[in-house]
Each structure stands twice: as structure tokens, then as C-alpha cells.
């Protein structure tokens, strides 16, 4: 565009010079004035052309810089998206928004702590190949993480088959709501484990996982621990240890609460008080509360019916049974009931 403009201006200067040289301007004073005007115009045109060429070069450089910045921004977004997978969303947001500084610092806050692991994990996986163990663990952790994030939990870490989660930092809904949300999350997790066990059984895994959960509410130190070069956003304190101890005494597929958590949620859930006990690392007697009704209103709604104990294994996938298959299933179970009743009569004689 600038070069077209240059050509037009150069043509105008050429015509003006030719007119001056033609001698058609006879008055000396007018010829001198015209000559001076043309000289000044040539000087102005030369300066303008230099500026426009400089502008073109700057525009090209600016486009190159803009393209480079766009590429670096895309790389940064991709990298930050990958890094986000190593942090809880709340922690990630607080760091990248500038709400939290990345430095060694801790606070003392009242949190609700969730701790879970798989009952007899080593024995359960002892005869499995590493690839099968990897699949089961990742499937289990993926499903539990989805539920945790949906409830707004801060996922602290995975420790093998164990999960440490807490509510109350960096965001909180209040101590009571945090505790209640944690309990509801744990219930949803145990219900989801029913579906996962049914799926794993159908895939041929003979001893699917059973999860135990402990929940406690109390004051913890939370923040960045470590060194200036390597930090870990986590929680520490006796209340964290207590959540772990409560998990260890929980029933398979069960949830055990501390008194502190129970007191906050007792109006919303059914519980059974246990006998006061001493647990390792806690210098006071602990009264555990077993959560009841975890699977209440679930069995009638879920697609799977699964019952397993020594000498018995029953598994039904209701979604896969058509009307004829359901009728046949009823007939087969009636036969089994008849045989069971016959065995009972024989044993009574």
C-alpha cells in the first residue's frame, strides 16, 4: 500500500519539476516561490517515505512478536493445564489467581478430614498381575476423585490405595457444612464402590476392592510444607492421624465418624455409637460413631444385585436381563431356595 502511494507522489513531483523546467512560469518571483515550494515538498516526501518504511518494518516486527507471544501463551496454557492435574482445583485457582503466594507458610484451621483405604489390599492383590493392579487402582482412584471434586473437596494426596481429602481450605462453607458435605461425599463414594465391584466381578476379578472410611473434624496445620525449592500443600496434626485411625477400625464398606464430626451432622444422618477406645498416637479415649443406612434406598434403585460371603455368591445385572431372562432368573433362584430349604430340613432331623 505504501509503495503505491510513493509512486503517485513521485509522479506528482516529476510533473511539477517538468512544469518548472518548461519555463511556463515567466514571473521571476513566482518561479522562485514555486521552486522553493517544490523543494520543500521533495524534502517532506523524503522524510515521509523514510518514516513509512520504518513503520512497515516495525509492523512486521510487531507481527512476529505477537505470533511468538501467541505461541508461548498456548504453550503456557497447555503446561498450566498439565500442572493442574497435580493440584486440587481450589489450590490451583488460588495460586494462579494470586490469592495465595507460593511460599512456605501454614495456618491453623478447623477442617474435616477424610481418610480411606482398601481392606486387605495386599492380600486382595497378591495373585494379580501388575497390569491388573494398575487398572483397578486407577479405576478406583479416578471414580473416587470425580466424586470428591464434585463435592468441592481438596484432594491432598493418594498414598498407594489410600486417599487423604479435606474440607475447609482453601475454600470453606463453614465448619458444619464442610463436615456434612464430607459425610455425603463418603456415602456417595461407598455407593459408587458397589457399582465398581459389580463391574470388576463381571470382568473376572474374584476379589474386588472394599473401602473403609474414617472422618474427623478438628484443628489442623494446613499450607505449604517443605523447602524453598520443593513444597507440598498438605495438612498435618493429630486430627489427621485420628481420621486414619478411625478408618482402620471401620467396617468394610463402612464409614466411621469421630465425636466431633458426629456432633456436627447428627441431625442429618443415622449413627450407632461405639465403645470408647484408645488408638495409637492419640492420648485420649475416642468414641467412634458408625454411620448407618449408607446403602438405604439404594438396593431398590441400583442396576446390580450383589451378595457375597463364604459359600455364596450372587450377582445380577438388572439392566442386562430381558423379561424372559428375569423369569428364568426367578425360576433358578426358586430352585436354589427349594434345595436350601431341603438341606435345612435334613439338618434339623
Image (cartoon, rainbow, N blue to C red):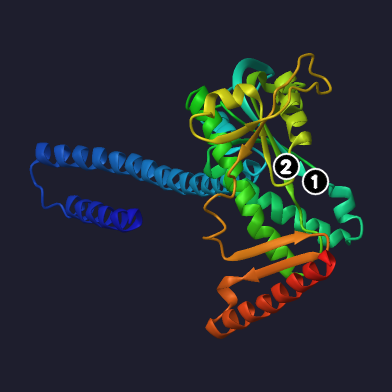
Where is residue 135? Give x, y as percent.
77, 59
Residue 315 screen position, x and y as percent: 69, 68
Is 46 situated left or right of 210 in this image? Answer: left
- The answer to whether 223 appears left or right of 169 in the picture is right
Q: Nearer the viewer, residue 284 or 144?
A: 284
Residue 192 in the figure: left or right of residue 343: left
Residue that label 1 marks:
119
Give the SS element for disc 2. strand
From the image, which quarter does the N terminus lie in? bottom left
- Which residue is located at x 70 percent, y 59 percent? 197
Disc marking residue 257? none
Picture residue at 87% right of the left edge, 59% below the top: 130
- Circle 2 is placed at which residue position? 212
Label total for image = 2
Judging depth in this view, the residue of 81 and 56 nearest the camera is 81
- How far is the residue under mark 2 from the one under mark 1? 7 Å
Q: Which of 239 and 333 is in front in this view?
A: 333
Which SS class for mark 1? Answer: loop
Residue 78 visible within the image: no
CB atoms of marks 2 and 1 within 8 Å: yes
Amino acid at each position: 500500500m505504501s509503495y503505491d502511494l510513493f509512486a503517485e507522489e513521485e509522479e506528482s513531483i516529476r510533473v511539477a519539476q517538468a512544469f518548472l523546467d518548461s519555463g511556463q512560469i515567466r514571473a521571476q518571483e513566482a518561479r522562485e516561490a514555486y521552486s522553493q515550494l517544490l523543494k520543500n515538498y521533495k524534502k517532506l516526501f523524503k522524510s515521509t517515505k523514510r518514516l513509512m518504511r520504518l513503520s512497515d518494518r516495525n509492523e512486521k516486527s510487531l507481527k512476529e512478536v505477537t505470533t511468538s507471544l501467541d505461541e508461548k501463551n498456548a504453550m503456557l496454557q497447555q503446561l498450566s493445564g498439565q500442572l493442574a492435574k497435580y493440584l486440587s482445583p481450589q489450590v490451583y485457582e488460588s495460586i494462579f489467581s494470586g490469592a495465595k503466594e507460593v511460599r512456605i507458610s501454614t495456618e491453623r484451621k478447623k477442617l474435616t478430614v477424610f481418610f480411606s483405604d482398601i481392606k486387605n489390599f495386599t492380600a486382595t492383590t497378591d495373585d494379580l498381575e501388575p497390569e491388573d493392579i494398575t487398572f483397578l487402582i486407577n479405576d478406583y482412584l479416578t471414580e473416587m476423585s470425580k466424586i470428591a471434586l464434585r463435592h468441592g473437596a481438596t484432594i491432598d494426596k493418594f498414598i498407594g490405595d489410600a486417599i487423604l481429602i479435606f474440607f475447609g481450605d482453601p475454600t470453606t462453607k463453614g465448619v458444619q457444612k464442610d463436615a456434612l458435605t464430607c459425610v455425603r461425599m463418603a456415602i456417595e463414594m461407598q455407593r459408587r464402590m458397589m457399582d465398581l465391584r459389580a463391574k470388576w466381578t463381571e470382568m473376572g476379578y474374584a476379589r474386588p476392592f472394599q473401602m473403609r472410611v474414617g472422618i474427623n473434624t478438628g484443628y489442623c496445620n494446613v499450607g505449604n510444607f517443605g523447602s524453598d525449592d520443593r513444597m507440598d500443600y498438605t495438612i498435618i496434626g493429630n486430627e489427621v492421624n485420628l481420621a486414619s485411625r478411625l478408618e482402620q477400625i471401620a467396617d468394610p464398606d463402612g464409614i466411621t465418624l469421630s465425636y466431633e464430626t458426629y456432633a456436627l451432622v447428627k441431625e442429618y444422618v443415622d449413627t450407632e455409637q461405639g465403645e470408647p477406645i484408645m488408638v495409637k498416637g492419640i492420648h485420649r479415649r475416642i468414641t467412634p460413631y458408625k454411620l448407618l443406612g449408607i446403602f438405604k434406598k439404594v438396593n431398590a434403585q441400583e442396576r446390580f444385585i450383589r451378595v457375597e460371603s463364604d459359600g455364596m455368591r450372587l450377582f445380577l445385572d438388572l439392566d442386562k436381563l430381558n423379561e424372559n431372562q428375569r423369569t428364568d432368573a426367578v425360576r433358578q433362584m426358586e430352585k436354589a431356595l427349594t434345595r436350601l430349604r431341603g438341606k435345612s430340613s435334613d439338618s434339623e432331623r
